[in-house]
Image (cartoon, grey):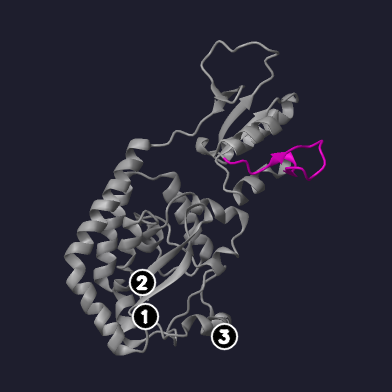
Amino acid sequence: MGHRLAGYLEKHPELGRSVCGFVDDWKPLGNGVIGRISELPELARAGFVDEVILAGPHDREKTRQVVRAAQRLRLDVKIAPDLFGCEPTRKTERIGDIPLISLHEEQLPVAGLMLKRALDVVGAGIALIFLAPALALVAMFVRLDSRGPALYSALRAGRKGRPFRCYKFRTMVLDADALKEGLREQNQRQGPFFKIRDDPRITRVGRLLRRYSLDELPQLWNVLKGEMSLVGPRPHPLDDFSAYAIEHLPRLDVLPGMTGLWQVTARGDPSFQAGMDLDIEYIHHWSLAVDLRILLKTAAVVLRGSGE
């Protein structure tokens, strides 16, 4: 039944589902079987899974094990039962000729998320219009201060780990990325995140821009494109993302943001795990009111000039 489901979904991409693989305690690995039931949490996180489908389960305890694991991971759970040729009497979903019964569904705040996106589009659009002269002036100073373009773009890990090109005003010398490896032993952050105080790659204008977070303003364009939000976990470079442990991946369940809870509560904390904990706390307790409070606190932090 699992292979029938997977085959149907593969032939109908318009349904918006793609199969990551099967977990099975009896079948050998391969032919779509990617692991055992006990490995479901790690496999689900690594594959950014949203839903688990139990295909014709016949072991009560293992079924309960899957359901409990999926609920802890905040995943939807559906079951494709063997109905012995009978039709279910309650409303179900169908994939081809196979009925799916929902055992657990995460309640997404759809209206709130739509309002969040509206806030992103309106806020970023208005900011870009009103700040256009200032942005042009900053770009001119960056070009005059050091050799190279005014804008810097690099790949960052976005929602579900999908890479996107993130924009900033250039605050470092032109060959900053090439010099990064030679400075890794001076890293003052704990974990995969890289940051050092008095980074020698930063230009004079760049230091001023970082102090007041002006270098982040081009990311308003990323917000308009739907790659970022005004508020969310900060996007990490791909080399930092490649060093994530499994427990770090939940921070990628949402769009990255221009500012976040970590930026307004623990900006100077060198602990990578502390930042991760704050990002997860933000995701689990998100609301529009939380976003608005973070935006107001961000304004205060920026005015204090506490950036590095």
Q: Tell me the residue that label 1 is attached to.
A: 171
| Residue 15, placed above or below residue 219 | above
Stretch in magenta: 18-37
**Mark 2 / mark 3, whichever is N-terminal:** 2
Residue at 62% x, 54% y: name it.
Answer: 246
Outermost residue to the front: 11
Structural distance between the alpha carbons of marks 2 and 3:
23 Å
Residue at 44% x, 86% y: name it.
Answer: 201
CB under 8 Å between discs 2 and 1: yes
Q: Tell me the residue that label 3 is attached to.
A: 182
Relative horizontal placement of residue 126, taking residue 44 as reference (left or right):
left
Q: Decide whether residue 19 is among the magenta residues.
A: yes
Q: Secondary structure at mark 3?
A: helix
Q: Quadrant of the N terminus?
A: top right
Q: Amino acid at mark 1?
A: Thr
Residue at 53% x, 20% y: name it.
Answer: 92
Q: Tell me the residue that label 2 is attached to.
A: 168
Whether residue 306 is visible, yes or no, is: no
| Residue 66, placed above or below residue 235 | above
Q: Amino acid at mark 2?
A: Lys
Q: Position of residue 4 (x, y in %)?
A: 68, 30
